[in-house]
Structure formats: structure tokens, C-alpha cells
Image (cartoon, rainbow, N blue to C red):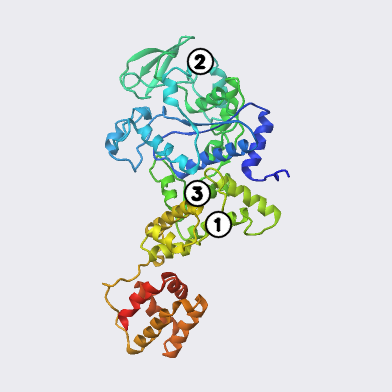
């Protein structure tokens, strides 16, 4: 039986790459970023979009090279708000990012600190690219030939760039940037190219002049709109997406798809991915301002599989928000539904089954599990964790029927649920069972009798199911002519010192006889 055709966007784009690039021994998919600050979840959208295309190509039986370029030879233009020692960092503006110190003191430079923060985390969500460091490549002379080609064909490149500019580039423009060997800054002016390997430049701050050899210098690089297509040609890139800023009319993708031909190649297949916002806060996330939500922030609340699921289930050209509010409950519920469909527990029509199965496959970090995870509603899990003061192992033990193959996934979900409860959940969602040392509430004589009856019902808790216990609580309220809402309010206050809480009968059943009786007994 053949595998059904997938209409998932990753598979559709993989087919497009194969169709447009033709048969190849290996396809190259690329991504990259300037490590100018904390790498945020909007940047991660590009990384995981490429990873999904890579997986789709591999699932079709193709060999794929997945490269991730750190543009760490870019200029340090702005100090992000969230960086320590900003005054020190300001003194490094206009220098290459790799020359900026890591003010946390953990790494050899600022770029490496931001790079390693990402590289250490990506395997957690199943992404393992080949990293390329552009500062290292430029400084070692790797691109010397390509820079000379750019100089030889500067008129063609200038004509392409001018098509998309309101003001043409000046006649003395050069397709090259130089970091001064006197100040390390890019505040330089190229004066002359000797037609071979020599470039003469002036440091605009010191007025010093120097001639450098492209084959041996560590000071020269191509500007972004020429550097990007040059690397497409150098690495033979078949696919690379870009954000809507690069894909906008006249943006860097428009110019690059022509300039790449100067270097003897063709533009890769691409698509535009949209921005991500954070629920409750609009606008574009930005590394340079420090106003970011990073992958570690998301992994605090969402397990690696659910983190992938957020992106797998959303087309890249669709803007969406990462939620840290009550939407978290629904997102986990949606993921669980997808998993139930995959394992055949939840029956749906054939078209939806194929769609959900593919989403589930692409959401997994590594191999697909052989059994369904322990399907516990996120809200109920939050209640169990609060009953047990965040003790994950106590919660797992209380469930009793968790299989060995389910434990680790459930443990991860418990950690995320507890992080969400303690850090992000609404105040009325949080509660703590009152302890032996908490002061007693003052109750009327009638209320004390009603609480005594509830205590006696909880003594026989195993005889009630949730519905029967709920009916008994209402019966107690009516017996003593207490309005049910008022009685519920009193019981919640006795148990968790709040006027509202989880559904009372289910809550009492979940807490168990021992915990509830220890609180109610103080009122007898």
C-alpha cells in the first residue's frame, strides 16, 4: 500500500524544489542570521521552516545538506536593551560583531555568546544543522575569488541595484566593505582597486590610507545584498526562505536573484514567512532592541513537540501569536487531538486523518513514538500539580497507570505546566491547599453543620462518583437553606482561600480523601 500524497506545506515545497532544481545527488537548504542580539522566536520560525523542508526532502528519499550561516562578520550597529554593560558595548559600535566582547564573561566574544545560546538549544527541538561562521570564512580568504568577481563586474551589479533605488549609487561606488586595520570600524572609503587583488582604502576617522590584498586580508567583505547571492552560488543553495522584509518588492531577495547570476548560479527556491507576535503584545519582535521572546522562553511553557507543532500546523506566510495566556490549554488540547488521530484513537474522515498524521510526524523531535502519550488534559494536570505543590514525581505516581514509554513525555509536560502556572497563568487560576497552620475561617453555626455533613460525605468518598458527589454538595446546601453559590464560596475559601476554583466535586475527588479531610476536620 503506497503512502498517501501529503498536502502539508513542507511536502508541497519539497516537491517544488525537486521540480525546479531537477534531480541531484544532494539538495542544499540554507538559513542564517546575524547574531546581533538574543535570537528570538521570530528567527526560530525561519530555522524550523527550513528544518521541515529538510525533513520532507529526506522523507522522499533524498540526501540533504542543511546549512546555517552565522553572519558574524556583520557590523555591530546597535546595543540591545537586554545586554549587560551597555556603555562598554557602545564603544564597539561599527566594528565586526566578533570583535565585540561578551559582557556576560562566558564566551570569547559577543557573537559567540548569541550563537552558542542557540546551538545548545536547537537539538532539544530536533534541529541539527551544519553551522557556517562567516567571519572565519572572510578572514581566511575563502571568498577572495568571489570578491574579485564582484569588483570585475561591479557595473553589472550596480545596474541591478540601481533598478530598485530611487537614487542611483555614485559612480565611485565599490561592491565591497572594508573594516579599518587602524580602528576596526567600517567607517572607511575605498579609493582604488588595482584590477587584481589590491584595494586601497582610507580610514575616515584617522585619515590614514592603506592598501590590502584580498587574498590575505581579514578586513574586507561583501555588503549584504551582494554577500547573500554570492553565498547562494558558493554553497549551491537550492532552498532558503526569508522574512517579508527581505521578500518585499525591491527588497534584498529581488536584487539577489539577479546578482546571483553574476556569480554563475541561480536563485534558490524560496518562500516568505510572516512575523510572529506574542499574545497580548503586538508588533514585530526585534533582536536589536532587546524586546524579544526567545526559544528558551517558549520551551518553559511548551514541550519540544508542542513547540514544533505550533509551527508545523501554521503556514509560514501566516502571521500568528505565541500565547502564554489561557490559550496554552487549548494548544495542548489540539496537540493531544492530533496525537489521538495519529494513533487511531480518535476517528475522523480520511482527508483530515492524512493531514493530522503528517502534522504529528513533523512535530516529533526524533523518531515517532511507538505508543500514545499519557493523555491527561492540561487543566487537570495543572490541578494535580497544585495539589502536590509542583512535585512532578508525586503527580506521576498518583496517576498509577503511566507506562514506562510515557513517563518522560509526561514528566516534560508536568515541568511545562508548572512553569506556566507559576509564571504566566492568570491569578484566579492559581491556588494552594490550606495547611494545618493556616488560620480557621469564622463560620456561622449553620455553616459548621453543613461543613460537618460535607466532611462525613468525604469520609465515604470512594462511594461517590463525581456527579453523585456534586449532587450531595447541592443537597447539603439545600438541607441547611444555604444558597448553593454561597456554600460553594465558603468551601473554596476553606480549602484554597479563594472564592472560586476548579469544579468542586471533581476537585475534591482529585485531591483525595486524606487531603480534604485534614482541612475539613479542623471545623468539626
Q: Secondary structure at mark 1?
A: helix
Q: Which residue is mark 1?
A: 336
Q: Please determine whether, in this image, residue 452 is positioned above or below residue 412.
A: below
**Quadrant holding the N terminus:** top right
Q: Which residue is mark 3?
A: 307
Q: What is the CA distance from the residue labelled 3 to the residue labelled 1?
A: 13 Å
Q: Which residue is mark 2?
A: 145
Which one is earlier in the sequence, the residue at label 3 or at label 1? 3
Between 263 and 17, the residue placed more toward the observer is: 17
Can the viewer see residue 486? no
Q: Position of residue 481 (x, y in %)?
A: 42, 90
Residue located at (45% from left, 82% from top): 473
Which one is earlier in the sequence, the residue at label 2 or at label 1? 2
The answer to whether the residues at label 2 and label 1 have Cβ atoms under 8 Å apart is no
Q: Secondary structure at mark 2?
A: helix
Which one is earlier in the sequence, the residue at label 2 or at label 3? 2
**Quadrant holding the C terminus:** bottom left
Q: How many other residues sit within 10 Å of disc 2, few (<14), some (14-19) or many (≥20)?
A: few
Amino acid at each position: 500500500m503506497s503512502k498517501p500524497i501529503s498536502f502539508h506545506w513542507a511536502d508541497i515545497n519539497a516537491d517544488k524544489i525537486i521540480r525546479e532544481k531537477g534531480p541531484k545527488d544532494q539538495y542544499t537548504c540554507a538559513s542564517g542570521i546575524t547574531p546581533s542580539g538574543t535570537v528570538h522566536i521570530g528567527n526560530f520560525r525561519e530555522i524550523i521552516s527550513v528544518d521541515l523542508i529538510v525533513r520532507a526532502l529526506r522523507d522522499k528519499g533524498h540526501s540533504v545538506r542543511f546549512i546555517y550561516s552565522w553572519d558574524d562578520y556583520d557590523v555591530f550597529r546597535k546595543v540591545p536593551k537586554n545586554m549587560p554593560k551597555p556603555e562598554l558595548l557602545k564603544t564597539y559600535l561599527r566594528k565586526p560583531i566578533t570583535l565585540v566582547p561578551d559582557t556576560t564573561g562566558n564566551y570569547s566574544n559577543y557573537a559567540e555568546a548569541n550563537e552558542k545560546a542557540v546551538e545548545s538549544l536547537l537539538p532539544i527541538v530536533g534541529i541539527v544543522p551544519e553551522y557556517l561562521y562567516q567571519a572565519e570564512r572572510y578572514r581566511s580568504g575563502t571568498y577572495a575569488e568571489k570578491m574579485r568577481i564582484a569588483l570585475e563586474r561591479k557595473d553589472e551589479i550596480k545596474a541591478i541595484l540601481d533598478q530598485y533605488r530611487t537614487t542611483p549609487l555614485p559612480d565611485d561606488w565599490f561592491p565591497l566593505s572594508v573594516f579599518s586595520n587602524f580602528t576596526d570600524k567600517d567607517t572607511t572609503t575605498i579609493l582604488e582597486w588595482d584590477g587584481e587583488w589590491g584595494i586601497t582604502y582610507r580610514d575616515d576617522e584617522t585619515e590614514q590610507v592603506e592598501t590590502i590584498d584580498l587574498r590575505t586580508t581579514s578586513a574586507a567583505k561583501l555588503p549584504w545584498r551582494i554577500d547573500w547571492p554570492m553565498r547562494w552560488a558558493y554553497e549551491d543553495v537550492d532552498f532558503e526562505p526569508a522574512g517579508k522584509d527581505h521578500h518585499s518588492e525591491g527588497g534584498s531577495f529581488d536584487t539577489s536573484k539577479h546578482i546571483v547570476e553574476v556569480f554563475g548560479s541561480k536563485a534558490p527556491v524560496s518562500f516568505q514567512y510572516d512575523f510572529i507576535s506574542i499574545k497580548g503584545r503586538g508588533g514585530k519582535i526585534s533582536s536589536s532592541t532587546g524586546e524579544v521572546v526567545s526559544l528558551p522562553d517558549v520551551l518553559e511553557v511548551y514541550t519540544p513537540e508542542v513547540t514544533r507543532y505550533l509551527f508545523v500546523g501554521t503556514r509560514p506566510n501566516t502571521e500568528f501569536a505565541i500565547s502564554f495566556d489561557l490559550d496554552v490549554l487549548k494548544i495542548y488540547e489540539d496537540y493531544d487531538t492530533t496525537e489521538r488521530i495519529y494513533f487511531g484513537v480518535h476517528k475522523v474522515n480520511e482527508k483530515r486523518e492524512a493531514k493530522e498524521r503528517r502534522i504529528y510526524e513533523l512535530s516529533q523531535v526524533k523518531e515517532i513514538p511507538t505508543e500514545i502519550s499519557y493523555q491527561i488534559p492540561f487543566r487537570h494536570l495543572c490541578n494535580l500539580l497544585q495539589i502536590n505543590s509542583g512535585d512532578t514525581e508525586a503527580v506521576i505516581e498518583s496517576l498509577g497507570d503511566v507506562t514506562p514509554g510515557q513517563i518522560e513525555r509526561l514528566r516534560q509536560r508536568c515541568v511545562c505546566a508548572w512553569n506556566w502556572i507559576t509564571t504566566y497563568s492568570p491569578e484566579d487560576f492559581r491556588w494552594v491547599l490550606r495547611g494545618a497552620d493556616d488560620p480557621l475561617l469564622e463560620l456561622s453555626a449553620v455553616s459548621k453543620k453543613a461543613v460537618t455533613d460535607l466532611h462525613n460525605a468525604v469520609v465515604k468518598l470512594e462511594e461517590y462518583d463525581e456527579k453523585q458527589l456534586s449532587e450531595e454538595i447541592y443537597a447539603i446546601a439545600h438541607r441547611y437553606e444555604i444558597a448553593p453559590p454561597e456554600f460553594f464560596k465558603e468551601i473554596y475559601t476553606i480549602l484554597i482561600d479563594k472564592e472560586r476554583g476548579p469544579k468542586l466535586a471533581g476537585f475534591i475527588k482529585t485531591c483525595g480523601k486524606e487531603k480534604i479531610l485534614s482541612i475539613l476536620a479542623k471545623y468539626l
